[in-house]
Image (spheres, grey):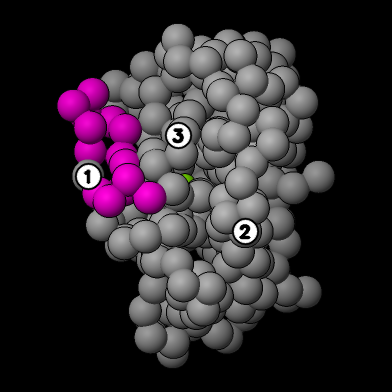
Amino acid sequence: MITLKSDRELEYMQIAGKIVAETHQKLEKAIKPGITTKELDTIADNYILSCGAKPAFKGYQGFPAAICTSINEAVVHGIPGLRELKDGNIISIDIGAVINGYYGDAARTYPVGTIDEDWAKLIRVTQEALDAGIAKAIEGNRLSDISNAVQVVAEGSGYSVVRDYVGHGIGREMHEDPQVPNFGKPGRGPRLRSGMVLAIEPMVNAGSYEVETLGDNWTVVTKDKSYSAHIEDTIAITPNGPMILTRI
Ligand code: MG
């Protein structure tokens, strides 16, 4: 069941979204060669708590950290640890926060130091794919119009979109209906209505879309070890168009 949020609820979701966006800003400044993913996790955890919110991923199905840190060929759900970032890496960071009972969720892929132009382009196209999807998040469109727009942009640059993980509705739960795939034909699925709030999150691979999970039972990597980018925003559908809750 897709729940529609009231204006009051959207105000709460804006608060959650802003905390997530600010946490990303803190991490963006901290990312440099030599820092460990655990140190990034601590920065995020402390900042979210200082806002009176809670990190939404911590303890979620047993996940042991506040954020997900996925380096290079890791797609999503990487666990922070003692690995140090190296010049030329790319790192996808996914952050969730809950406050007043409402969730915000956003991911970014960051360069570490100086990166190869190939990976810079991968990140740029993933951002463009997300933005194309958000542009379709308009009252009266259908859900798969978003999915198709994301896919067309990503595949138009020769990349692939991950099939096994998708975006989602969000609100009083981190994962609500509907699922929001990053691929598919347009004109399908539920009609979009004001008050729907969605986390749209393309995972774009430089090679094949196939992924597998590592032995830690969390980290999802590309099967062919090609690099992957993941960019996500929580957005609300309003009479005035899409409202992005997780950007400042
Ligand atoms: Mg999400």
Residue position marked by numbered label 1 in the rendering: 212
Extreme-bottom residue of the structure: 187
Is 131 placed above or below 176 here?
below
Mark toward the viewer: 2 or 3: 2
Rendering coords of residue 213 (x, y %) = 23, 38
Give the position of the N terminus as an image quadrant: bottom left
What residue is at 77 percent from the left and 26 percent from the top? Answer: 29
The amino acid type, in three-letter code, at marker 1 is: Glu
Is 56 placed above or below 232 here?
above
Residue position marked by numbered label 2 in the rendering: 121
Whole-angstrom CA distance, mark 3 to mark 1, is 13 Å
Q: Quadrant of residue 210?
A: bottom left
Is 242 placed above or below 85 here?
below
Residue position marked by numbered label 3 in the rendering: 70
Extreme-left residue of the structure: 215
The amino acid type, in three-letter code, at marker 2 is: Lys
Mark toward the viewer: 2 or 1: 2
**For marks 2 and 1 on the same chain, the one whose residue lies earlier in the sequence:** 2
Looking at the rendered structure, the number of numbered marks drawn on it comes to 3
| In the image: residue 31, left or right of residue 62 | right
What residue is at 69 percent from the left and 36 percent from the top? Answer: 114
Q: Quadrant of residue 36?
A: top right
**For marks 3 and 1 on the same chain, the one whose residue lies earlier in the sequence:** 3
Rendering coords of residue 164 (x, y %) = 27, 56
Q: Nearer the viewer, residue 164 or 188?
A: 164
**Is residue 167 something one can see in this rendering?**
no
What residue is at 69 percent from the left and 17 percent from the top? Answer: 47
Q: Is residue 48 magenta?
A: no
Q: Residues within 10 Å of mark 2 (few under 14, many from 20)?
A: few
- Would you say the beta carbon of the disc 3 residue lies within 8 angstroms of ligand 1? no
